[in-house]
Amino acid sequence: MQDADLVRDFLDDLLVEEGLASNTLEAYRLDLAGLTAFLATHCRVGQTVGLATVTPEDLANFLEYLFHQKMSSTSVARKMSAIRRFYRHLLVTEQRSDDPTRLLSSPKARRSLPKIFDEAEVNALLSAPEQDNELGVRDAAMLELLYATGLRVSELVTLRTDSLDTDMGMLRVVGKGDKERLIPVGEMALERIAHYQRVARPLLLAARPATTALFVTHRGQAMTRQNFWYIIRRHAVNAGILKPISPHLLRHSFAVHLLNHDADLRAIQMMLGHADISTTEIYTHVSKVRMKQVHARFHPRASSPV
């Protein structure tokens, strides 16, 4: 079987068995394409080396090559994770009799703590949109819902008008890998969305084709990640927030603020849609760091007298 066929079979298996998102599958394809290109140009002069015939020494050489390219340990670890999965697949499907990655060590990716808004900054951001026009009403509803539920931005912009059950106060979300989850929505977010749907959305869709998208642009089209990125950045500036803004900042803040108020970690995992609790646990570290900072700043005996 040719290298391209092996990779395609591997990716098809991940799609069917695990329902991985297209972006993840494409990242795996590119990682394996990088290894294929390296084998074609750097390994065993005069010999043809493919993915099916690679040796542990070939992979060690590939690791060394990546470091010589000044690639970060995080990026190298991610590539090696894809390669390990690929060779486990070949072993399980009996396309190889051994796993060439078995004894290969790769760098531990340094996991940086996510940045968050503090609660005062969240309040300032959510109050920033002027609600005297349909765009301001829409922006206020989007920001409130994002913080109320911890949605990914990609999930927010793909919500439909039937995604929210206002009677139950529950939001149905289709997340990574097309996995569906239910998230409770607080009263403030419900009120802002109801106001948006009653007052602003009809104006934004006036004389335009109907759409099932919950949040729409001034052109009456479905909201995009790029449009929302511009919106949140503009309102953060208006709120006097000077820190760098990322699309996930409200999602991270949602998780940490819940932990600060003694929410159960498993419940947060379910609301965020994390497959593994270890992904959610990183927020406990952020919460601890924040508590230490607050203690050091405000406790009268936090520091020794000079």
Image (cartoon, rainbow, N blue to C red):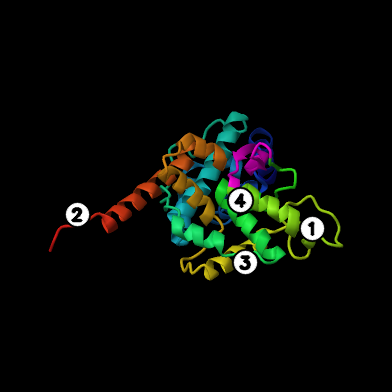
Please give left or right for residue 44 compared with residue 17 in the image. left
What's under tag 4, amino acid-wise? Leu
Name the N-terminal-most of marks 3 and 1. Answer: 3
Q: Quadrant of residue 15?
A: top right
SS for callout 4 = helix
- Tally of marks: 4
Q: CA distance from mark 3 to mark 4?
A: 17 Å
Query: Pointer 4: what residue?
Result: 145
Q: Nearer the viewer, residue 167 or 180?
A: 167
Name the N-terminal-most of marks 4 and 2. Answer: 4
Q: Which residues are magenta?
A: 167-187
Q: Quadrant of the N terminus?
A: top right
Identify the disc placed on residue 130: 3
SS for callout 3 = loop
Q: Nearer the viewer's eye, disc 3 or disc 2? A: 3
Q: Nearer the viewer's eye, disc 3 or disc 4? A: 3
Name the N-terminal-most of marks 3 and 4. Answer: 3
Query: Pointer 2: what residue?
Result: 301
Q: Residues within 10 Å of mark 2 (few under 14, many from 20)?
A: few
Q: CA distance from mark 1 to mark 4?
A: 19 Å
SS for callout 1 = helix
